[in-house]
Image (cartoon, rainbow, N blue to C red):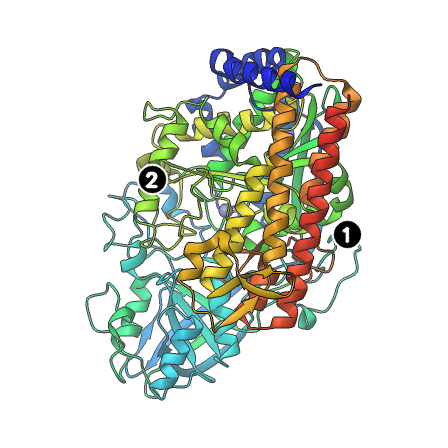
Amino acid sequence: MTLSRSIALALLSLSFTAANAQIQGFTPASSTHEAEVEKKFKSIPSPEEERRQHRIFTQEPHIAGSKRNNELAEYIRDEWKKQGLEDVVIRRYDVYGTNPKSTFLEMTAPTHYQALLRETPIPGDDDSKNPAITSAWLGMSISGEVTAPLVYAHSGNPEDYDLLRKNGISVKGKVVLVRYSNPYSYRGFKALTAQREGAAAILIYSDPQEDGYKKGKVDPDGPWGPEYHIQRGAITYDFMVPGDPLTPGWASVPGAKRIPIEDAVSAPKIMALPLSWHDAKPLLENLGGPAAPADWQGGLGFEYHFGGEQEKVHLKIEMDNGTQPYYVVEGRIRGSELPDEWIVLGNHRDAWVFGGVDPSSGTASMMELTRALGQLKQQGMRPRRTIIVCSWDGEEVGLTGSTEWGEQFADELRSKAVAYINVDEATSGPEFHGQAVASLAPMLEETTRTLDDPSGKSLYDAWKATVAKERENKSSGPFNSGASNSTLADTRIGSGSDHTVFLNFVGMPVIGLGFEGDYGVYHSAYDDFYWMNHFGDPGYRYHTVMSQLWGVTALRLANADLLPFDFAMYASNIRQFVNDLASNNKLVILREVDGSRSEPATQSKDLVSRLDLTDVILDLISVMKTTDAFEAAGKKLNYSVEAKLASGPIDPKLAATLNHGMMQVERNWLNPDGIPGRPWFKHILYGARFTYAHLELPGLTEAVEAKDSPTAKQQAEILQRALEKNTKLLRDLNESLNSK
Ligand SMILES: [Zn+2]
């Protein structure tokens, strides 16, 4: 094809886009067909069915490994078969179990107080009376008993212990009392920090300032956490390696090799217990010693003190750690034309208690999504590629079910998988959040344009408004929005849900979808059906939109003629990651002058002027140059693909070459050795901090932050090589497209 012809076609396709809504990745004829399929699909999910499914999943507590959760696995299997899904199986993983036998806490001095460790029933919410609700406990706590002095350590982050030290207070052998979110950090990071400080145990409580009455009305009058709510959770060190601690990097299929728990890096070595503020208040109120500083104060209405030697607590925790089976349910609709190209969808089933939001809102949305997919198939609208849907188990314990499944099928996924779409909490309120690797951000945005938000706007416009609001108060929230300015999607992807194994271990592009709102009952017994029907999504309209969005996104990936990846967008995102790394660490990006000396690179002029030149200096100019080349190759490919699509049907062989090539790009971001110190995490662009926060260019960033120049140079070279490999790949694809 000549250049002028391809320009003409590109122009044609642009005007076509406006007039006939040509969809990214589709020819005009396929776009028309796809629009019909999507219209049919969107008409199927209903709020009544979402509510009915939600009630089934929130009827009883269903923690990982419990009888009820296993019954729900069988229920999903049977429903999927009825709905028309194919190859429905339940896969079993035998994992290290973590269940409470008994927990006990009392203050013994200066006064006596025995902690309740239970959530009291809420008037009007009959589920809150269910005797199967567990007491306070944290997954992966060790068993033990201790009587020791109590110290208040604020949020339990390293800087908090530094401040205690400055005040002459050691926590060695003592029990530390910390709060959940000020600022937010993953409870497992708090546990590891306390363990490193030599504490005997850690108590983590919910301060009303963060999720209770200081935020607004509490349950049953509002969405915030009441006096007795307990945030359960696991403290697994899954930021080191997720999944079953006894099988790091391989699947816990029955009979698999296992390491001793003492050798497991992700298994905590400390006792840990969560508390409601009802139970934390008498402890805090009776702490003496110096007054804690202003930013350590909370919402309980008295002055918080550090504590000292006089105040003592007695803690006893007995856990049951036998091996237990976790069950992943898997079903699919086999692709009509390309059955060996897979779109994988997943949601976890296990909940700390009822799981009203987390995860049963997502599970209800998944059941409506699969019902709609089954109906399409029965009406002759089978997707071109295979859509696989999974119900994960043990996400709450250590992302366990998805990790074991991903490890079991890693090789097959690396050759067949197009993308993974995760929905954990489908809805806790009306604000849409979409996460995606940057190459899929534009297609996700485009998809939201075709959906109606319950507010009356398009989902795209509603999303845009949410992102604008977030960017305004960017510094105020515990989770800074990572959305870059060129896209609505949050392209800074940390850990904390089931996408982790697919992105960081397998090397699959991922998308994460969820609606959010005020939500103070997370991981407590009050996160239930009542809460959802009064606060989260009373009409189940957001659940319904989630089923539609999740399904339409999957269908676009499944039916596209040429997969809708945008690698130019990926490149500009990577450039932003590198620039952020430089500015956050006062790095100067050097460029060569006359092949001998170096001077600050001019392309980041405004950046350089703000930098302290004396700190760390790293030559990232080759990385920047190759990022530019990758972007140019991505733009050319976008252009050629668009022109090709506009010209009509595509030769299947050519389409296969292009699609397999594009699927390979994400795999090429993997370094088989993993990031330094954490070999399981293989992606060189995405990782997570120990706090669960997103961490871009993880190996390089951690080396720079540690001022470890040799490792930083080595990691920069690995990035450089991956960029070169993907640039060449895109150029080859572009050539194959233009030589036909
Ligand atoms: Zn969840």
Q: Residue 330: which quarter of the image?
A: top right
Q: Which residue is mark 2?
A: 468
737 relative position to 107: left or right: right
Query: Mark 2 and mark 1 in contact (Cβ < 8 Å)?
Result: no
Amino acid at pointer 1: Pro
Residue 387 visible from this viewpoint: yes
- Ligand 1 neighbours mark 2 (CB distance < 8 Å): no
Q: Residue 280: which quarter of the image?
A: bottom left
Quadrant housing the N terminus: top right
In percent of width and height, residue 736 lies at 76, 28
Q: CA distance from mark 1 to mark 2?
A: 49 Å
Point out the frontmost of discs 1 and 2. Answer: 2
Amino acid at pointer 2: Ala
Q: Which residue is mark 1?
A: 254
In percent of width and height, residue 465 lies at 33, 35
- Seen in the picture, residue 86 relative to 271 is either above or below; the reply is above
Q: Earlier in the sequence, mark 1 or mark 2?
A: 1
Which residue is nearer to you in this view: 471 or 74?
471
Residue at image location 23% in from the left, 49% down from the top: 216
